[in-house]
Image (spheres, rainbow, N blue to C red):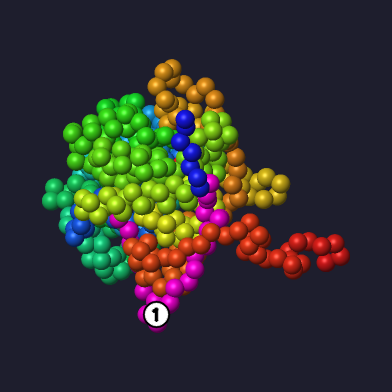
Amino acid sequence: MAKYYTEPSRTFTEYLLIPNLSTKDCTPDNVSLKTPLVKFKRGENPELSLNIPFASAVMQAVSDHHMAVALARSGGISFIFGSQPIKEEAEMVRKVKAYKAGFVISRSNLTPEHTLKDVLELKEKTGHSTLAVTGDGTAKGKLLGIVKGSDYRISRDALDKPISQFMTPFASLIYGKQGITLSEANDLIWEHKINCLPIVDEEQNLEYLVFRKDYEAHKEYPNELLDANKSYIVGAGINTKDYKERVPALVDAGVDVLVIDSSDGYSEWQRETIQYVKANFNVKIGAGNVVDREGFLYLVESGADFVKIGIGGGSICITREQKGIGRGQASSLIEVTEARDEYYEQTGIYVPICSDGGIVHDYHITLALAMGADFVMMGRYFARFDESPTRKLKVNNNFVKEFWGEGSNRARNWERYDSGGKSGLLFEEGVDSYVPYAGSLRENMEKTTSKIKSTMCNCGSKTIPQLQREARITIVSATSLVEGGAHDVILKESGLSGE
Ligand code: IMP
């Protein structure tokens, strides 16, 4: 006979937090959202942590290199989508790693033999008004000069004029030497009233450009998630099919952490993939998705550095309708957290949990953390921002952004849903949709994190581990759910006729 669970499976909206005593020092400024990303031993620090507990979903419509830079700047991590050719995914990772906070690898480069026409064309293509002139026209070639808008006059100069005749030559350039710090570079920028400072090595080869505006931006992001080389930390999705080719390419591109992206992670394929990665590379790897203690322990014992929880709760997900599998996100988290804590008790190894999918309101994030998640992964949330890779459109007079599931015909990510047998997507597990456009990632995340911090203060918690230990959580009845929103009043924006 099948096993029956006596409790129904529940989701976030069915729970609320009950305030604990807030001590006077428990103010939002004193709250830290730092959280482990990968497993660690008791008494040690994790090798990778996040400054805010947010990860962007492994999805075509969410996590490309632009999203990864924007999110790492704010302290979280993106997992670049794996449903693309290996070379392209690796290239996105490479772009993120090349984007050092404040130090930029020059992306618009020409040789002195190129002409003004080439300058104008490149400027049009990249939008960059400062171009590096190198011996071989590459980003790392010998720096011979810089071209900026004030070096030429389109109305006077002939289009075939060679760059060598109008660039600012190296001998007249202010430049920084390899190893210079960002603040030293900034001092030079101010001292000499320039907008861009090239950094060169001992052989005069170009290393980076430092822009005045980037330094200003850098100062505004105190939570930036950086590696030891001051590059942004980035993750990438892999599958259990082509990992022997994909993982080496991603590692070569400098990826910090991998995640196996699958709708059902409780499988021998995941174990094989984790073991292959562990045996051949020194890179962290998360696995999932699972929804119960058995699945969690299986992946942990296979070597996973973190485990992703959630089946069927994603906003674009129709897995439950199509296949009848899944579990309410709160119930999954509660059970897995219990298993994780027991495992920690027994072995002294703490394995972070990522709650993936189904975050609708900001407070769901706080609930997920209180229920034991160390960080959350979100698709819909990030898809709404300027930084997501999809088109912004106007539909019925409202701005929206496109958002489609990895299991939709549009993404055709059959590797994520494959359960052996014939390859290909025989039926959809996700939809193609729009989400309301919400503006910039930064502004939205500031609002969300300040809500989380405020709730944590209500719960008397200054850190996520404290919240996980001390939170008090209650189930809400269907009747008290009604009480949770505005009720028994006439809302002004309801557009009553005559108003
Ligand atoms: P959201 O934050 O509720 O939008 O959920 C995002 C999560 O949904 C992702 O991180 C995936 O785990 C999951 N997901 C992505 N695409 C699909 C799909 O097509 N079907 C089912 N689940 C999906």
Q: Is residue 374 above or below residue 260?
A: below
Stretch in magenta = 8-36
Residue at the image point whose x is 71% and y is 46% from the top: 396
- Does the image show residue 228? no
From the top left corner, tell me how far across and down residue 395 is, in percent: 67, 45
Q: Measuring 31% from the left and 46% from the top, which residue is drawn there? A: 306
Looking at the image, the residue that sits furthest to the bottom is 24
Question: Which residue is farthest top?
Answer: 422
Snapshot quadrant of residue 492: bottom right
Quadrant for the C terminus, please.
bottom right
Element on which disc 1 rests? loop
Q: On the image, which quarter does residue 29 sit in?
A: bottom left
Q: Nearer the viewer, residue 73 or 139?
A: 73
Residue 27 painted magenta: yes
Amino acid, disc 1: Thr
Task: Report x, y in % for residue 223.
Answer: 34, 62
